[in-house]
Protein backbone atom coordinates (compact mmCIF):
# COMPACT_ATOMS: atom_id res chain seq x y z
CA UNK A 1 0.00 0.00 0.00
CA UNK A 2 2.82 2.38 0.76
CA UNK A 3 4.38 1.61 -2.60
CA UNK A 4 1.10 2.28 -4.39
CA UNK A 5 0.58 5.58 -2.58
CA UNK A 6 4.10 6.62 -3.41
CA UNK A 7 3.53 5.89 -7.13
CA UNK A 8 0.27 7.89 -7.18
CA UNK A 9 1.89 10.86 -5.45
CA UNK A 10 4.77 10.83 -7.91
CA UNK A 11 2.38 10.76 -10.90
CA UNK A 12 0.33 13.66 -9.49
CA UNK A 13 3.49 15.65 -8.95
CA UNK A 14 4.56 15.07 -12.56
CA UNK A 15 1.13 16.10 -13.88
CA UNK A 16 1.14 19.25 -11.75
CA UNK A 17 4.52 20.25 -13.02
CA UNK A 18 3.41 19.61 -16.62
CA UNK A 19 0.29 21.79 -16.16
CA UNK A 20 2.33 24.63 -14.73
CA UNK A 21 4.76 24.37 -17.62
CA UNK A 22 1.92 24.51 -20.20
CA UNK A 23 0.34 27.50 -18.46
CA UNK A 24 3.65 29.33 -18.49
CA UNK A 25 4.05 28.55 -22.19
CA UNK A 26 0.60 29.96 -22.93
CA UNK A 27 1.34 33.08 -20.97
CA UNK A 28 4.61 33.51 -22.78
CA UNK A 29 3.06 33.26 -26.29
CA UNK A 30 3.70 36.57 -28.11
CA UNK A 31 0.80 38.84 -29.08
CA UNK A 32 -0.12 38.59 -32.78
CA UNK A 33 1.05 41.23 -35.19
CA UNK A 34 -1.96 43.20 -36.48
CA UNK A 35 -1.93 45.92 -39.13
CA UNK A 36 -3.13 49.27 -37.80
CA UNK A 37 -3.61 52.80 -39.07
CA UNK A 38 -3.75 56.23 -37.50
CA UNK A 39 -6.97 58.06 -38.23
CA UNK A 40 -6.42 61.48 -39.79
CA UNK A 41 -8.62 64.19 -41.22
CA UNK A 42 -8.20 64.50 -44.98
CA UNK A 43 -10.16 66.09 -47.83
CA UNK A 44 -11.85 63.51 -49.97
CA UNK A 45 -14.41 63.00 -52.70
CA UNK A 46 -16.84 60.13 -52.39
CA UNK A 47 -18.80 58.72 -55.29
CA UNK A 48 -22.33 57.38 -55.20
CA UNK A 49 -23.20 55.03 -58.05
CA UNK A 50 -26.83 54.54 -59.07
CA UNK A 51 -28.25 52.45 -61.95
CA UNK A 52 -29.56 54.50 -64.85
CA UNK A 53 -31.57 54.09 -68.05
CA UNK A 54 -30.63 56.11 -71.13
CA UNK A 55 -33.26 57.69 -73.34
CA UNK A 56 -33.04 60.06 -76.26
CA UNK A 57 -34.04 63.67 -75.75
CA UNK A 58 -37.11 62.83 -77.80
CA UNK A 59 -38.34 59.33 -78.63
CA UNK A 60 -41.18 59.83 -81.09
CA UNK A 61 -43.37 56.93 -82.17
CA UNK A 62 -44.09 57.25 -85.88
CA UNK A 63 -47.70 56.44 -86.71
CA UNK A 64 -49.63 57.12 -89.92
CA UNK A 65 -52.55 59.52 -89.79
CA UNK A 66 -54.47 57.60 -92.44
CA UNK A 67 -55.00 53.91 -93.12
CA UNK A 68 -53.29 52.36 -96.11
CA UNK A 69 -50.85 49.77 -97.35
CA UNK A 70 -47.15 50.59 -97.20
CA UNK A 71 -45.82 50.92 -100.74
CA UNK A 72 -42.30 52.13 -99.93
CA UNK A 73 -39.93 52.16 -96.94
CA UNK A 74 -37.47 54.98 -97.58
CA UNK A 75 -35.11 54.52 -94.60
CA UNK A 76 -33.36 51.73 -92.74
CA UNK A 77 -32.98 50.91 -89.06
CA UNK A 78 -30.28 52.94 -87.33
CA UNK A 79 -30.20 55.55 -90.08
CA UNK A 80 -29.77 59.22 -89.16
CA UNK A 81 -32.61 61.31 -90.61
CA UNK A 82 -33.41 64.99 -90.79
CA UNK A 83 -36.67 66.70 -89.89
CA UNK A 84 -39.10 66.41 -92.81
CA UNK A 85 -37.27 63.51 -94.47
CA UNK A 86 -39.57 60.89 -95.98
CA UNK A 87 -39.74 57.68 -93.98
CA UNK A 88 -42.66 55.72 -95.50
CA UNK A 89 -45.05 56.07 -98.42
CA UNK A 90 -48.56 54.60 -98.26
CA UNK A 91 -50.81 53.64 -101.17
CA UNK A 92 -51.95 56.94 -102.71
CA UNK A 93 -54.45 55.74 -105.34
CA UNK A 94 -57.65 56.10 -103.33
CA UNK A 95 -56.50 59.35 -101.71
CA UNK A 96 -55.57 60.85 -105.09
CA UNK A 97 -59.00 59.86 -106.40
CA UNK A 98 -60.60 61.60 -103.43
CA UNK A 99 -58.62 64.75 -104.24
CA UNK A 100 -59.71 64.65 -107.88
CA UNK A 101 -63.33 64.20 -106.89
CA UNK A 102 -63.16 67.06 -104.39
CA UNK A 103 -61.53 69.29 -107.01
CA UNK A 104 -64.36 68.53 -109.44
CA UNK A 105 -66.90 69.45 -106.77
CA UNK A 106 -65.11 72.74 -106.18
CA UNK A 107 -65.15 73.51 -109.89
CA UNK A 108 -68.87 72.72 -110.05
CA UNK A 109 -69.54 74.88 -107.00
CA UNK A 110 -67.60 77.76 -108.53
CA UNK A 111 -69.75 77.51 -111.67
CA UNK A 112 -72.92 77.52 -109.56
CA UNK A 113 -71.69 80.62 -107.70
CA UNK A 114 -70.95 82.40 -110.97
CA UNK A 115 -74.43 81.57 -112.31
CA UNK A 116 -76.11 82.66 -109.07
CA UNK A 117 -74.11 85.89 -109.11
CA UNK A 118 -75.23 86.69 -112.65
CA UNK A 119 -78.83 85.98 -111.75
CA UNK A 120 -78.64 88.19 -108.68
CA UNK A 121 -77.04 91.05 -110.61
CA UNK A 122 -79.79 90.83 -113.25
CA UNK A 123 -82.56 90.74 -110.65
CA UNK A 124 -81.03 93.67 -108.86
CA UNK A 125 -81.09 95.78 -112.04
CA UNK A 126 -84.72 94.84 -112.67
CA UNK A 127 -85.66 95.73 -109.09
CA UNK A 128 -84.09 99.14 -109.45
CA UNK A 129 -86.50 99.70 -112.38
CA UNK A 130 -89.41 98.36 -110.31
CA UNK A 131 -89.91 95.54 -112.77
CA UNK A 132 -89.70 92.81 -110.13
CA UNK A 133 -90.61 92.71 -106.49
CA UNK A 134 -88.34 92.67 -103.47
CA UNK A 135 -89.29 89.06 -102.91
CA UNK A 136 -87.81 87.91 -106.23
CA UNK A 137 -84.61 89.85 -105.53
CA UNK A 138 -84.32 88.27 -102.06
CA UNK A 139 -84.81 84.80 -103.49
CA UNK A 140 -81.98 85.45 -105.93
CA UNK A 141 -79.76 86.73 -103.11
CA UNK A 142 -80.51 83.59 -101.06
CA UNK A 143 -79.62 81.36 -104.01
CA UNK A 144 -76.29 83.21 -104.37
CA UNK A 145 -75.53 82.76 -100.67
CA UNK A 146 -76.39 79.07 -100.90
CA UNK A 147 -74.08 78.64 -103.90
CA UNK A 148 -71.24 80.35 -102.03
CA UNK A 149 -71.84 78.11 -99.02
CA UNK A 150 -71.71 75.03 -101.24
CA UNK A 151 -68.43 76.32 -102.68
CA UNK A 152 -66.97 76.72 -99.18
CA UNK A 153 -68.04 73.17 -98.32
CA UNK A 154 -66.46 71.83 -101.49
CA UNK A 155 -63.23 73.73 -100.82
CA UNK A 156 -63.09 72.34 -97.28
CA UNK A 157 -63.57 68.83 -98.64
CA UNK A 158 -60.75 69.45 -101.12
CA UNK A 159 -58.45 70.66 -98.35
CA UNK A 160 -59.25 67.56 -96.30
CA UNK A 161 -58.63 65.26 -99.27
CA UNK A 162 -55.32 66.98 -100.01
CA UNK A 163 -54.31 66.64 -96.38
CA UNK A 164 -55.11 62.94 -96.40
CA UNK A 165 -53.11 62.55 -99.59
CA UNK A 166 -50.21 64.33 -97.89
CA UNK A 167 -50.47 61.98 -94.92
CA UNK A 168 -49.63 59.07 -97.20
CA UNK A 169 -46.06 60.38 -97.14
CA UNK A 170 -44.86 59.84 -93.57
CA UNK A 171 -41.97 62.16 -92.67
CA UNK A 172 -39.60 62.51 -89.71
CA UNK A 173 -40.93 64.98 -87.13
CA UNK A 174 -37.39 65.81 -85.95
CA UNK A 175 -33.75 64.99 -86.48
CA UNK A 176 -32.83 61.65 -85.02
CA UNK A 177 -32.05 57.99 -85.46
CA UNK A 178 -34.52 55.47 -86.86
CA UNK A 179 -35.41 52.58 -84.57
CA UNK A 180 -36.72 49.16 -85.52
CA UNK A 181 -39.04 48.87 -88.53
CA UNK A 182 -41.39 45.95 -87.88
CA UNK A 183 -43.58 46.44 -90.97
CA UNK A 184 -42.38 46.51 -94.56
CA UNK A 185 -43.90 47.00 -98.02
CA UNK A 186 -47.34 45.48 -98.34
CA UNK A 187 -48.21 45.73 -94.65
CA UNK A 188 -51.33 47.60 -93.64
CA UNK A 189 -50.62 50.72 -91.60
CA UNK A 190 -53.27 52.36 -89.45
CA UNK A 191 -53.42 55.10 -86.82
CA UNK A 192 -55.05 52.62 -84.45
CA UNK A 193 -52.28 50.01 -84.76
CA UNK A 194 -50.73 49.09 -81.43
CA UNK A 195 -47.26 48.97 -82.92
CA UNK A 196 -45.81 52.14 -84.49
CA UNK A 197 -44.15 52.12 -87.90
CA UNK A 198 -40.87 52.99 -86.18
CA UNK A 199 -39.40 55.34 -83.57
CA UNK A 200 -37.23 58.37 -84.29
CA UNK A 201 -34.93 59.22 -81.39
CA UNK A 202 -33.22 62.58 -81.15
CA UNK A 203 -29.86 61.51 -79.70
CA UNK A 204 -28.04 64.82 -80.01
CA UNK A 205 -28.67 64.99 -76.28
CA UNK A 206 -29.71 62.10 -74.05
CA UNK A 207 -31.34 61.79 -70.68
CA UNK A 208 -30.08 59.37 -68.04
CA UNK A 209 -32.89 58.47 -65.65
CA UNK A 210 -32.08 57.23 -62.14
CA UNK A 211 -33.77 57.27 -58.73
CA UNK A 212 -33.21 59.00 -55.41
CA UNK A 213 -34.90 57.91 -52.21
CA UNK A 214 -37.13 60.15 -50.16
CA UNK A 215 -34.32 60.46 -47.60
CA UNK A 216 -31.87 61.54 -50.31
CA UNK A 217 -34.24 64.29 -51.41
CA UNK A 218 -34.75 65.45 -47.83
CA UNK A 219 -30.97 65.58 -47.39
CA UNK A 220 -30.66 67.60 -50.62
CA UNK A 221 -33.17 70.16 -49.38
CA UNK A 222 -31.79 70.10 -45.82
CA UNK A 223 -35.11 68.87 -44.52
CA UNK A 224 -37.07 71.45 -46.50
CA UNK A 225 -34.91 74.43 -45.48
CA UNK A 226 -34.28 75.23 -49.15
CA UNK A 227 -36.16 74.59 -52.36
CA UNK A 228 -35.58 71.54 -54.51
CA UNK A 229 -34.80 73.76 -57.52
CA UNK A 230 -32.00 75.46 -55.58
CA UNK A 231 -30.65 72.08 -54.49
CA UNK A 232 -30.62 70.82 -58.10
CA UNK A 233 -28.70 73.90 -59.28
CA UNK A 234 -26.05 73.30 -56.62
CA UNK A 235 -25.60 69.63 -57.46
CA UNK A 236 -22.18 68.87 -58.99
CA UNK A 237 -21.68 67.56 -62.50
CA UNK A 238 -22.27 63.82 -62.76
CA UNK A 239 -20.59 61.10 -64.79
CA UNK A 240 -22.08 58.22 -66.73
CA UNK A 241 -20.59 54.76 -66.47
CA UNK A 242 -21.52 52.72 -69.51
CA UNK A 243 -22.56 49.09 -69.52
CA UNK A 244 -19.03 47.94 -70.41
CA UNK A 245 -17.58 49.71 -67.37
CA UNK A 246 -16.06 52.65 -69.25
CA UNK A 247 -16.78 56.25 -68.27
CA UNK A 248 -18.49 58.46 -70.85
CA UNK A 249 -16.04 61.32 -71.56
CA UNK A 250 -18.57 64.17 -71.22
CA UNK A 251 -20.02 65.15 -67.87
CA UNK A 252 -23.74 65.63 -67.39
CA UNK A 253 -25.94 67.83 -65.27
CA UNK A 254 -28.94 66.88 -63.18
CA UNK A 255 -31.86 68.66 -64.83
CA UNK A 256 -35.01 67.65 -63.00
CA UNK A 257 -36.29 65.67 -60.03
CA UNK A 258 -39.81 64.31 -60.21
CA UNK A 259 -42.20 65.89 -57.76
CA UNK A 260 -43.89 62.54 -57.11
CA UNK A 261 -42.44 59.73 -54.99
CA UNK A 262 -43.39 56.25 -56.14
CA UNK A 263 -45.33 54.47 -53.39
CA UNK A 264 -43.99 51.11 -54.51
CA UNK A 265 -40.29 52.01 -54.52
CA UNK A 266 -40.19 54.98 -52.16
CA UNK A 267 -38.02 56.81 -54.70
CA UNK A 268 -38.34 59.71 -57.11
CA UNK A 269 -37.20 59.74 -60.73
CA UNK A 270 -34.25 62.02 -61.52
CA UNK A 271 -33.09 63.08 -64.98
CA UNK A 272 -29.55 64.04 -65.96
CA UNK A 273 -28.76 65.57 -69.34
CA UNK A 274 -25.70 64.60 -71.40
CA UNK A 275 -24.52 66.01 -74.73
CA UNK A 276 -24.08 63.26 -77.31
CA UNK A 277 -22.36 64.83 -80.34
CA UNK A 278 -20.90 61.58 -81.67
CA UNK A 279 -24.07 59.54 -81.20
CA UNK A 280 -22.27 57.08 -78.93
CA UNK A 281 -25.17 56.93 -76.52
CA UNK A 282 -28.32 55.26 -77.79
CA UNK A 283 -31.84 55.44 -76.49
CA UNK A 284 -32.74 52.34 -74.48
CA UNK A 285 -29.21 51.76 -73.19
CA UNK A 286 -28.28 51.25 -69.55
CA UNK A 287 -25.47 52.42 -67.32
CA UNK A 288 -24.81 53.98 -63.94
CA UNK A 289 -24.80 57.58 -62.76
CA UNK A 290 -21.80 58.56 -60.61
CA UNK A 291 -22.51 61.45 -58.23
CA UNK A 292 -19.42 62.95 -56.54
CA UNK A 293 -19.59 64.34 -53.00
CA UNK A 294 -16.67 66.49 -51.83
CA UNK A 295 -15.82 66.62 -48.12
CA UNK A 296 -13.26 69.17 -46.96
CA UNK A 297 -12.24 67.36 -43.77
CA UNK A 298 -13.22 63.76 -43.19
CA UNK A 299 -12.13 60.76 -41.14
CA UNK A 300 -11.72 58.03 -43.75
CA UNK A 301 -11.33 54.40 -42.68
CA UNK A 302 -11.44 51.16 -44.68
CA UNK A 303 -14.71 49.26 -44.53
CA UNK A 304 -12.77 46.09 -43.66
CA UNK A 305 -11.70 47.79 -40.38
CA UNK A 306 -15.31 47.74 -39.13
CA UNK A 307 -17.79 45.12 -38.02
CA UNK A 308 -21.49 45.15 -37.25
CA UNK A 309 -23.23 43.99 -34.10
CA UNK A 310 -26.94 44.48 -33.42
CA UNK A 311 -27.31 47.09 -36.17
CA UNK A 312 -24.35 49.07 -34.84
CA UNK A 313 -20.93 49.46 -36.41
CA UNK A 314 -17.72 49.07 -34.41
CA UNK A 315 -13.95 49.43 -34.81
CA UNK A 316 -11.12 48.17 -32.64
CA UNK A 317 -9.24 51.15 -31.18
CA UNK A 318 -5.75 50.55 -29.81
CA UNK A 319 -5.67 51.37 -26.08
CA UNK A 320 -3.30 51.01 -23.15
CA UNK A 321 -0.85 48.10 -23.16
CA UNK A 322 -1.59 47.67 -26.89
CA UNK A 323 -4.97 46.17 -26.12
CA UNK A 324 -7.79 46.72 -28.60
CA UNK A 325 -11.12 48.08 -27.43
CA UNK A 326 -14.29 47.70 -29.51
CA UNK A 327 -15.70 51.18 -30.05
CA UNK A 328 -19.06 52.06 -31.64
CA UNK A 329 -18.97 54.55 -34.50
CA UNK A 330 -21.41 56.21 -36.87
CA UNK A 331 -20.66 56.62 -40.55
CA UNK A 332 -21.99 58.71 -43.41
CA UNK A 333 -24.55 56.97 -45.65
CA UNK A 334 -22.47 58.09 -48.66
CA UNK A 335 -19.93 55.40 -49.45
CA UNK A 336 -17.74 54.39 -52.36
CA UNK A 337 -17.99 50.70 -51.47
CA UNK A 338 -14.46 50.50 -49.99
CA UNK A 339 -14.24 53.20 -47.32
CA UNK A 340 -16.44 54.87 -44.73
CA UNK A 341 -16.57 58.49 -43.60
CA UNK A 342 -16.75 58.40 -39.80
CA UNK A 343 -19.00 61.06 -38.30
CA UNK A 344 -18.62 60.14 -34.60
CA UNK A 345 -17.04 57.61 -32.25
CA UNK A 346 -13.36 58.17 -32.99
CA UNK A 347 -11.15 61.23 -33.37
CA UNK A 348 -8.01 62.20 -35.28
CA UNK A 349 -4.93 60.49 -33.87
CA UNK A 350 -6.74 57.32 -32.78
CA UNK A 351 -5.11 54.09 -33.93
CA UNK A 352 -7.45 51.39 -35.20
CA UNK A 353 -6.91 47.80 -36.33
CA UNK A 354 -7.43 47.16 -40.03
CA UNK A 355 -6.67 43.45 -40.04
CA UNK A 356 -8.34 40.47 -38.40
CA UNK A 357 -11.53 42.38 -37.62
CA UNK A 358 -14.35 39.92 -37.13
CA UNK A 359 -12.02 36.90 -37.23
CA UNK A 360 -8.89 37.11 -35.04
CA UNK A 361 -9.54 40.08 -32.78
CA UNK A 362 -11.66 40.30 -29.66
CA UNK A 363 -12.35 43.04 -27.15
CA UNK A 364 -9.43 43.55 -24.73
CA UNK A 365 -7.01 41.44 -26.77
CA UNK A 366 -3.33 42.49 -26.75
CA UNK A 367 -1.65 42.88 -30.14
CA UNK A 368 1.62 43.96 -31.69
CA UNK A 369 0.57 46.96 -33.83
CA UNK A 370 2.22 47.20 -37.23
CA UNK A 371 1.66 50.20 -39.51
CA UNK A 372 -0.56 49.01 -42.34
CA UNK A 373 1.29 51.02 -44.99
CA UNK A 374 4.67 49.66 -43.91
CA UNK A 375 3.31 46.13 -43.75
CA UNK A 376 1.88 46.43 -47.27
CA UNK A 377 5.24 47.70 -48.53
CA UNK A 378 7.06 44.80 -46.86
CA UNK A 379 4.64 42.27 -48.31
CA UNK A 380 5.00 43.78 -51.78
CA UNK A 381 8.80 43.66 -51.51
CA UNK A 382 8.70 40.06 -50.35
CA UNK A 383 6.41 39.09 -53.20
CA UNK A 384 8.70 40.80 -55.71
CA UNK A 385 11.68 39.02 -54.24
CA UNK A 386 9.95 35.65 -54.53
CA UNK A 387 9.03 36.33 -58.15
CA UNK A 388 12.63 37.28 -58.87
CA UNK A 389 13.88 34.12 -57.23
CA UNK A 390 11.40 32.02 -59.23
CA UNK A 391 12.74 33.45 -62.48
Image (tube, grey):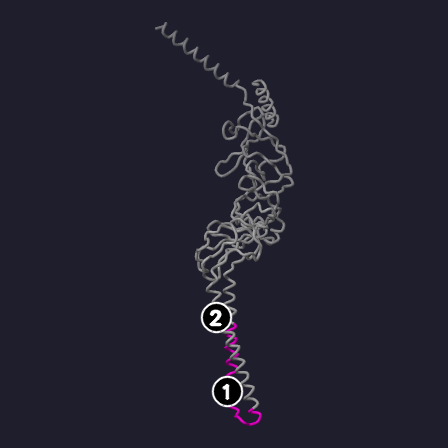
Element at label 2: helix
Q: Residue at x 52, y 83 (%)?
A: 116
Image quarter where the C terminus lies is: top right
Task: Kindly identify which numbered label has been placed on residue 108.
Answer: none
Q: Earlier in the sequence, mark 2 or mark 1?
A: 2
Image coordinates of residue 33 in percent, x first then y, are: 56, 23
**The residue positioned farthest toward the left in the image shown:** 1
Which quarter of the figure has residue 318?
top right
Task: Kindly identify which numbered label has been placed on residue 139.
Answer: 1
- Decide whether residue 127 is among the magenta residues: yes
Bin the neighbour count of mark 2 within 10 Å (Cα to Cα): few under 14, some 14-19, many 20 and up: some
Bin the neighbour count of mark 1 within 10 Å (Cα to Cα): few under 14, some 14-19, many 20 and up: few
Image coordinates of residue 105 in percent, x first then y, are: 49, 74
Q: Above or below — where is 325 with respect to 265?
A: above
For the record, the magenta segment spans 126-155
Q: Which residue is mark 2?
A: 101
Image quarter where the N terminus lies is: top left
Image coordinates of residue 370 in percent, x first then y, are: 59, 25
Q: Residue at x 51, y 34 (%)?
A: 307
Query: 141 and 62: which one is in front?
Result: 141
Query: 63 and 301: which one is in front?
Result: 63
* Magenta-colored segment: predominant secondary structure: helix
- Decide whether residue 339 is among the magenta residues: no
Alpha carbons under labels 2 and 1: distance apart: 30 Å
Q: Above or below — where is 386 with respect to 275?
A: above
Which quarter of the figure has residue 14?
top left
Amino acid sequence: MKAILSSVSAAALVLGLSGCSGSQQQQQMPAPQIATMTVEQTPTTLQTTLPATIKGKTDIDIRPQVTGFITKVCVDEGQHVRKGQTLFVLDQVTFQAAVDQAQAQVNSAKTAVATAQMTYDSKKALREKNIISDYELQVSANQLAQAKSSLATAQAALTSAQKNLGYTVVTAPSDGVVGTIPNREGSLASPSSAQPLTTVSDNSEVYAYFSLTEKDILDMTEGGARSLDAAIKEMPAVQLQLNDGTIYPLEGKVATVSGVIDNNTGASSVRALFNNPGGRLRSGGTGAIIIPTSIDSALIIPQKATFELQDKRFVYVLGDSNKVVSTPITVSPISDGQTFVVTSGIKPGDVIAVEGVGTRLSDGMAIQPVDAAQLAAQQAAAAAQQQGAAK
